[in-house]
Image (tube, coloured by chain):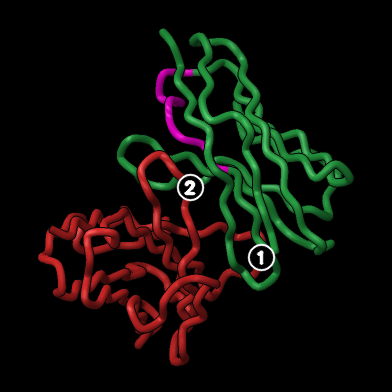
Chain colours: A green, B red
């Protein structure tokens, strides 16, 4: 079974500062995909960034980047220059080759003005 | 971009009645759709995988006779909560992947969710 763990239920960061959200996962598969999704108060799920497990290079998307450590099964999200609009729940997600997504427990991020 | 429409956004029903939730992919075709349930301040729990033209695959612990899933076309999947009870009150979210996507890392496109309240 796949499990995704986010050990930080709540975090806060000052506007314009940098914050890192952690995620670990457990799987016996070698090929898989990892994602970070954002869920603002509107409850709409929004894709933030994705990473293929077979790629060693960490994915980046503007202010968002990941630190993917395959051996450690770790997939953290770094948000640089935090903005008020970044306030949301953030979910780490694991996708197996059967296309099922499994989500972590979520981290509630608050950006403080 | 890919849009998934979920209807209704909110529904209140009486205990013992059934409620149907629709999930439509508006500008793409989806052979596979997924249904999730989310409790307040908790994660999305995968309930079932809906496959067009075949039976849905349910996750362990999800009652298939209570949560009926029908995926009759490439753009529509429905979730029917039968004989609803107050403990079925929750936020239900559907998602889909574009069947024409050539990349295995293509993300899911999510509906806006349905808040079900059973009184």
- Give me the residue at 48% from left, 57% from top: B45
- Give me the residue at 53% from left, 39% from top: A106
Percent x, y for residue B6?
Answer: 28, 62
Closest to the observer: B111 or A24? A24
**Mark 2 vs mark 1: same chain?**
yes
Residue B103 tag number: 1
- Residue A89 in magenta? yes
Percent x, y for residue B83?
Answer: 21, 76
- Residue A104 in magenta? no
- Mark 1 surroundings within 10 Å by alpha-carbon count, few (fewer than 14), some (14 through 19), many (20 or more): few
Residue B76 visible to the viewer: no
Q: Which residues are magenta?
A: A83-91
Label 2, on which residue? B43
Q: Residue furthest right?
A: A71
Earlier residue among tags 2 and 1:
2
Rendered position, A15 above or below A57: above
Foreground label between 2 and 1: 2
- Give me the residue at 77% from left, 58% from top: A27
Rendered position, B32 above or below A45: below
Q: Chain of mark 2?
A: B
Rendered position, B3 above or below A89: below
Q: CA distance from mark 2 to mark 1?
A: 26 Å
Closest to the observer: A67 or B69? B69
């Amino acid at each position: 079974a796949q499990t995704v763990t986010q050990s930080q239920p709540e975090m806060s960061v000052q506007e314009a500062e940098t914050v890192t959200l952690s995620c670990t996962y457990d799987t016996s598969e070698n090929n898989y995909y990892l994602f970070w999704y954002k869920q603002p108060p509107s409850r709409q799920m929004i894709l933030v960034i994705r990473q293929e497990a077979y790629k060693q290079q960490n994915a980046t998307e503007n202010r968002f980047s990941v630190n993917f450590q395959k051996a450690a099964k770790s997939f953290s999200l770094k948000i640089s220059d935090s903005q008020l609009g970044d306030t949301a729940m953030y979910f780490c997600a694991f996708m197996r080759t059967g296309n099922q997504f499994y989500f972590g427990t979520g981290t509630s991020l608050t950006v403080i003005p | 971009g890919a849009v998934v429409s979920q209807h209704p956004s909110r529904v209140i029903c009486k205990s013992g009645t059934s409620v149907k939730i629709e999930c439509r992919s508006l500008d793409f075709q989806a052979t596979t759709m997924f249904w999730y349930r989310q409790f307040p301040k908790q994660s999305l729990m995968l309930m079932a995988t809906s496959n067009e033209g075949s039976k849905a695959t349910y996750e362990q612990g999800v009652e298939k006779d209570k949560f009926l899933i029908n995926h009759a076309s490439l753009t529509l999947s429905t979730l029917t909560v039968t004989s609803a009870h107050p403990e079925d009150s929750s936020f239900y979210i559907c998602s889909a992947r574009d069947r024409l996507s050539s990349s295995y890392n293509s993300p899911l496109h999510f509906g806006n969710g349905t808040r079900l309240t059973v009184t």
